[in-house]
Amino acid sequence: MLSFLGLTRKSGQLLLGYNKNEEAIKTKKVSLLIVSKDASENTKDKFKGYCEKYKVPLIEDFTPDELGYALGYEGIAVVGITNKNMSKKLLHIYDSNKEEE
């Protein structure tokens, strides 16, 4: 999944950071949100609320270092995917990997 996330970044279909994603969710531009499992409780609670309100799927299963490594940055806490097809593919890969565990 993290490899495909890197491809998503290269295609320009990804938003990084708290503020960009907060605004994008409110304007319904995000179709999948990934929040680091090591993000602050305040951050996780805020984005969980936004995702419920705006019906955006949320994944909270990676460390900031794992996300950062996949995207070529250091320590990423919040990642938003703006392309619906990419989001569906990422969710499918994520769900398939969860079933194998």
Image (cartoon, rainbow, N blue to C red):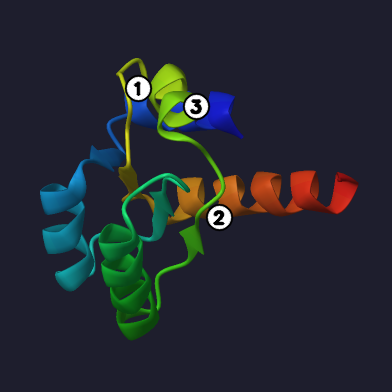
Above or below, 70 relative to 97:
above
Residue 53 in the image, given as x and y percentages of width and height: 32, 84
Amino acid carrying label 2: it is Lys
- Residue 8 lies in quadrant: top left
Q: Which residue is mark 3?
A: 66
Identify the disc placed on residue 56.
none
Above or below, 40 relative to 41:
above
| Label pair 3/2, CB-CB below 8 angstroms | no
Query: Label 3: how many residues lie within 10 Å, few (<14), some (14-19) or many (20+)?
Result: some
Identify the disc placed on residue 88.
2
> Marks 3/2: CA distance?
21 Å
Residue 2 in the image, given as x and y percentages of width and height: 55, 29
Identify the disc placed on residue 10.
1
Looking at the image, the residue that sits furthest to the bottom is 53
Can you see residue 87?
yes
Residue 30 in the image, given as x and y percentages of width and height: 30, 59
> Marks 1/2: CA distance?
17 Å
Earlier in the chain: of badge 3 and badge 2, it is: 3
Amino acid carrying label 1: it is Lys
